[in-house]
Amino acid sequence: MIAVITRTNSNDKQTLGRLYMYDLMDKEIFTCCTLELSNNGNRQGDSRIPEGSYNVVQRISPSLGLTFHIQDVPDREFILIHSGNYYSQIKGCVLVGDSFVDINHDGQLDVTNSRATLNTLLELADDFQLTITDIEFLNA
């Protein structure tokens, strides 16, 4: 499996994007929304990770349960793809969901149906290659 996160919008709090999952024949088999922190110099716990290609494997987190672990992020540890709705629930990881909605009315878009979206992704792949790319940033 191959996945691509395309980051599209960012502001001083968060980054929005889309994750596309492809089978080995380059056929798109899944897509969802992603939510990350803004770019704060790749600081542990306070920034999204740099653009690049990473190996991703399933991992059981003591606090989050079954997640995906993005491996070999420069100068970072334990970067996960996990469920959650708000940028305030992110410590440098990637949240997934099926749409963007301002759930808590704080002026920031959140991701919805995150647990179900993550479960679908977990059913599709045990591990995959992930490429993260920034295409264009607009103030969200």
Image: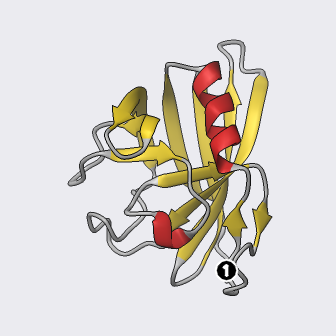
Q: What residue occupies the far left of the structure in this picture?
A: 75
Left or right, residue 64 beside residue 82: left
Which quadrant of the structure image shows residue 117? top right
Who's the residue at 66% across and 68% down the image?
A: 136
Please name the residue that numbered disc 1 is placed on: 108
Left or right, residue 90 beside residue 19: left
The quadrant in which the C terminus is found is: bottom right
Q: Residues within 10 Å of mark 1 (few under 14, many from 20)?
A: some
The quadrant in which the N terminus is found is: top right
Q: x, y percentage for residue 77?
A: 24, 48
Q: Secondary structure at mark 1?
A: loop
Q: x, y percentage for residue 112?
A: 73, 57
**For residue 130, above or below residue 64:** above
Foreground residue among 21 and 66: 66
Left or right, residue 37 beside residue 110: left
Q: x, y percentage for residue 115?
A: 63, 44
Who's the residue at 68% across and 17% down the image?
A: 23
Q: x, y percentage for residue 135?
A: 64, 60
Amino acid type, callout 1 = Gln
**For residue 79, above or below residue 129:** below
Foreground residue among 4 and 99: 99
Foreground residue among 120 and 21: 120
Color theme of the render: secondary structure
